[in-house]
Image (cartoon, rainbow, N blue to C red):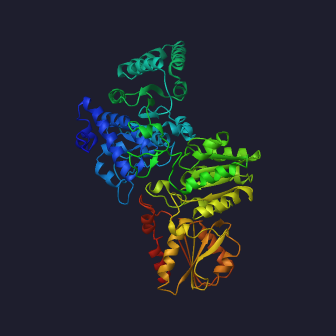
């Protein structure tokens, strides 16, 4: 398609040269561009379609990189990238050596901060704003925060520390609340009045004059402010934000680009931290995304002309397999509950929600609460299953230690997107869970295919007590892994006869590379046996003894090396007085994980079959 206006905008400076009446057509072009490109490459769609006008207005009124825009969450930054000269990069969005799907200061000076996890932007923005004050630098700091982030506690921790930062603007991108026409009209009028610089100046002057009157001045100012607070509470319920120190503006139509430009332009002069409440439609302009924004939050490539119902015909994956398995278990186990943190579709729990809504809990973007809430349920005899992406489970580490492990609460963690994750880059990799869970003594299991998931999930539900975890990768099982089936054992010899000089040891989806490496080694070092673990911690009994007879043992995992499963195995081999060569191939601290396909990431990290075989042959 042709995008005549968008093709004229390769920088925020060029955006400012457009006529006011061209902004709405520009937004329409951006919306079509995003639908066309994200449907081809995959990416985050709903959130970006809902923030187009907001982002255009921000770049029209402010000047990056002097002014800083901090996104929460960063996946809503696509329009920002388009307006800052990266349109051509959308050809390889979230692909190797292509455009990142999140803000990246290494990619552009217009990106203020990496923001892959939610409810962090206000804290970041306060830090940047304070730094500007200390250094005497000009410019505003704008935090664009989705309403989902307000389900996490860190937002409120940040707002409690805004001080008197008159260079801080927080924009709530609210796509859930609705406002009646009467209240909306009055609120719009008051917002227009209160964003007028002359009004703000007059208000500040009046309060200064009144405050200078001996004895009665301060009470008069407090009385005036109290009266305004009562009025605001009745009109648009802004009291919480005002009491935290913000000047509250809104609600405003987050898709009225002209009004937004006017509002943001008026904020060049401000006397306090400002909170702008913008109402938007998630998935705006693309009907399937508007009707089901959760399913179109993050998508693989799709055909916009043929959209299926995600509740009826989802793609086969570990997530959907887990979700369906959990429904079957819950039919005969009334104490079983399911918890997720704003990822109902992503974790496959939409099936559980439809069948057992009373036992399903979506706590929002609040992983810490999810884990402690689960501990509370478990303390009363329930069995909560907490389904969270690996990268987000990191946020609840303290709660895992204090509220689950120390009390030995009966909580099952279902860790989705474990291991390497395609596309999203370093902020969304699930490479720490096996290490940090094992460090605090939580048993961990890692099926490599659906058959193992089907076998081990019921066992973890029925045969174990206390905290435990089952982890599985994003996407499906692949033909090579499906062919392995399930032995029901905590580890098994899945290739070779046990007589080769080399043993390759792996778990989860890395079995694919280990099997391929064994085939390569069969032509070079007289073959290799492959051992695949399902039980990662504690390591299965007899494993170290079984491996002690090999000349070379190579353990490969798509997790962090320090504290990882491979280090646990090394310690066990030491107790067996192992005299052979031990190689641990894993992710090293500080290693950069690119946004790419999983095979490409493995290759970049030296975890592919060729690299594993080479490591054996080099010795």
Image coordinates of residue 187 in percent, x first then y, are: 45, 20
Left or right of 53: which side holds 417? right
* Vertical position of residue 144 compared to residue 502: above or below: above
Location of the N terminus by quadrant is top left
Residue name at image x 42 percent, y 58 percent: 595
Residue name at image x 66 percent, y 51 percent: 328
Left or right of 3: which side holds 492? right
Q: Residue furthest bottom?
A: 526
Image coordinates of residue 53 in percent, x first then y, are: 36, 34
Q: Quadrant of residue 593?
A: bottom left
* Vertical position of residue 327 compared to residue 548: above or below: above
* Vertical position of residue 406 compared to residue 77: above or below: below
Image coordinates of residue 9 in percent, x first then y, are: 25, 42
Q: Quadrant of residue 166?
A: top left
Image coordinates of residue 266 in percent, x first then y, are: 35, 26
**Can I make out residue 493 in this image?**
yes
Residue name at image x 61 percent, y 63 percent: 451
Number of numbered tags placed on the structure image: 0
* Vertical position of residue 180 compared to residue 121: above or below: above
């Amino acid at each position: 398609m042709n995008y005549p206006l968008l093709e004229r905008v390769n920088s925020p400076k060029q955006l400012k040269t457009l006529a006011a009446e061209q902004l709405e057509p520009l937004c329409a072009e951006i919306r079509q561009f995003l639908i066309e490109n994200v449907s081809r490459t995959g990416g985050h769609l709903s959130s970006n379609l809902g923030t187009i006008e907001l982002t255009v207005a921000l770049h029209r009124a402010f000047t990056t990189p002097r002014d800083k825009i901090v996104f929460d969450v960063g996946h809503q930054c696509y329009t920002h990238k388009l307006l800052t000269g990266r349109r051509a990069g959308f050809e390889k969005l979230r692909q190797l050596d292509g455009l990142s799907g999140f803000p990246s200061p290494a990619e552009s000076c217009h990106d203020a901060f990496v923001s892959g996890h939610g409810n962090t932007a206000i804290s970041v923005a306060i830090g940047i704003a304070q730094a500007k004050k200390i250094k005497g630098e000009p410019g505003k700091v704008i935090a664009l925060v989705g309403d989902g982030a307000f389900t996490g506690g860190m937002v409120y921790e940040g707002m409690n520390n805004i001080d008197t930062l008159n260079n801080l603007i927080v924009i709530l991108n609210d796509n859930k609340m609705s406002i009646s026409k009467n209240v909306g009209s009055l609120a719009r009028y008051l917002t227009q009045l209160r964003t007028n610089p002359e009004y703000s100046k007059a208000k500040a002057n009046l309060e200064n004059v009144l405050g200078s009157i001996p004895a009665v001045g301060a009470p008069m100012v407090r009385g005036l402010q109290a009266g305004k607070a009562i009025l605001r509470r009745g009109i648009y319920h802004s009291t919480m934000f005002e009491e935290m120190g913000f000047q509250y503006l809104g609600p405003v139509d987050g898709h009225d680009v002209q009004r937004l430009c006017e509002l943001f332009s008026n904020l060049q002069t401000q006397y306090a931290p400002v909170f702008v409440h913008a109402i938007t439609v998630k998935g705006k302009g693309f009907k399937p995304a508007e009707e089901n924004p959760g399913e179109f939050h993050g998508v693989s490539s799709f055909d916009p002309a043929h959209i299926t119902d995600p509740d009826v015909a989802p793609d086969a994956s570990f997530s959907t397999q887990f979700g369906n398995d959990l429904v079957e278990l819950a039919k005969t186990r009334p104490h079983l509950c399911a918890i997720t943190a704003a990822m109902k579709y992503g974790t496959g729990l939409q099936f559980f929600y439809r069948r057992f809504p009373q036992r399903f809990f979506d706590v929002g973007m609040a992983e810490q609460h999810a884990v402690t809430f689960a501990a509370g349920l478990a303390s009363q005899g329930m069995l909560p299953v907490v389904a969270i992406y690996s990268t987000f489970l990191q946020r609840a580490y303290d709660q895992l230690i204090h509220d689950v492990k120390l009390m030995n609460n009966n909580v099952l963690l279902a860790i989705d997107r474990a291991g390497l994750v395609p596309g999203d880059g370093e902020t969304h990799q699930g490479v720490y869970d096996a290490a940090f869970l094992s460090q605090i003594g939580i048993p961990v299991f890692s099926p490599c295919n659906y058959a193992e998931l089907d076998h081990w999930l019921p066992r973890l539900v029925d045969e174990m007590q206390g905290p435990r975890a089952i982890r599985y990768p994003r996407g499906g099982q692949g033909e090579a892994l499906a062919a392995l089936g399930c032995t029901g054992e905590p580890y098994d010899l899945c290739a070779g006869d046990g007589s080769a000089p080399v043993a390759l040891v792996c778990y989860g989806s890395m079995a694919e590379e280990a099997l391929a490496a064994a085939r390569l080694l069969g032509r070079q070092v007289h073959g290799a046996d492959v051992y695949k673990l399902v039980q990662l911690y504690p390591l299965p009994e007899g494993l170290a003894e079984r491996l002690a007879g090999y000349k070379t043992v190579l353990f490969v995992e798509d997790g962090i090396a320090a504290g990882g499963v491979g280090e646990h195995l090394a310690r066990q081999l030491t107790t067996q007085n192992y005299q052979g060569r031990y190689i641990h191939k894993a992710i090293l601290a500080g290693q950069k994980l690119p946004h790419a396909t999983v095979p490409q990431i493995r290759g970049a990290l030296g975890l592919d079959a060729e690299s594993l075989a080479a490591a054996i042959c080099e010795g």
